[in-house]
Image (cartoon, rainbow, N blue to C red):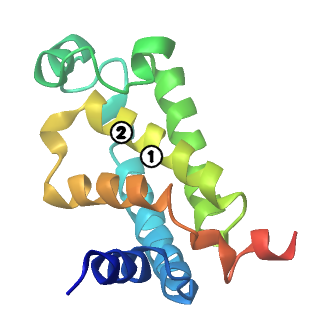
Amino acid sequence: MTLQAIRNAWNDFFFTKQPVTGIAVFRICFGLVLILNALFLLAGFSDWFGSHAIVQYSTALTFTGTGRINLFSILGASDSSAYLIYGTHLIAIVGLTLGLWTRSSAVVAFITLVSLHHRDPLILNSGDTAMRVILFLLMFSRAGDAFSLDRWR
């Protein structure tokens, strides 16, 4: 096998256009999972994320550190900022599910989800980590190119 053949195989594998319907269907299904997760969080929201939460913000910082993405460090750890971040997260994941400004919705959903997760890291499990990783990867995908409102704009 020559160096040119290896280069061509590399380029064919990584840069050949692929259909986006699979990632679009995944985006919709994953968006529904994110919506369900957000609705489950709402049940005890002030207990987990409010200013008088079970885990205080200062305690959460000892687990996560200060050099992380965390909107609470900008807005403060009040009830109103927690609900603002949650509302923004809900709007972003609905936009992601519908494919409305898909890439921007994925970025906002990622930042708000990471902020909520860093606010109380003790309630997380591996599924929450998987959600963060998948949202991060969706930011770079062409998930809005099919089955989305972006496609019709």
- Residue drawn at x 35%, y 61% as measured from the top left: 134
* Local secondary structure at mark 1: helix
Amino acid type assigned to the residue bearing label 2 in the image: Val
Residue 90 in view, yes or no: yes
Residue 13 coordinates in the image, percent (x, y) = 37, 81
Q: Which residue carries the number 1 mark?
A: 110
Q: Is residue 148 left or right of residue 8?
A: right
- Residue drawn at x 42%, y 83% as measured from the top left: 12
Amino acid type assigned to the residue bearing label 1 in the image: Phe
The answer to whether 91 is drawn above or below residue 127 in the figure is: above
Residue 8 coordinates in the image, percent (x, y) = 39, 80
Q: As rendered, which of 132 and 46 lies closer to the eye?
A: 132
The answer to whether 7 is drawn above or below residue 72 in the figure is: below
Q: Residues within 10 Å of mark 2 (few under 14, many from 20)?
A: many
Quadrant hosting residue 137: bottom left
Residue 76 in view, yes or no: no
Quadrant hosting residue 147: bottom right
Residue 60 coordinates in the image, percent (x, y) = 19, 21
Name the mark on residue 126: none
- Residue drawn at x 48%, y 73% as measured from the top left: 32
3D distance between C-alphas at marks 2 and 1:
6 Å
The N terminus - image quarter: bottom left
- Residue drawn at x 71%, y 76% as measured from the top left: 148
Cβ atoms at labels 2 and 1 below 8 Å apart: yes
* Local secondary structure at mark 2: helix
Q: Residues within 10 Å of mark 1 (few under 14, many from 20)?
A: many
Name the mark on residue 114: 2
The C terminus - image quarter: bottom right
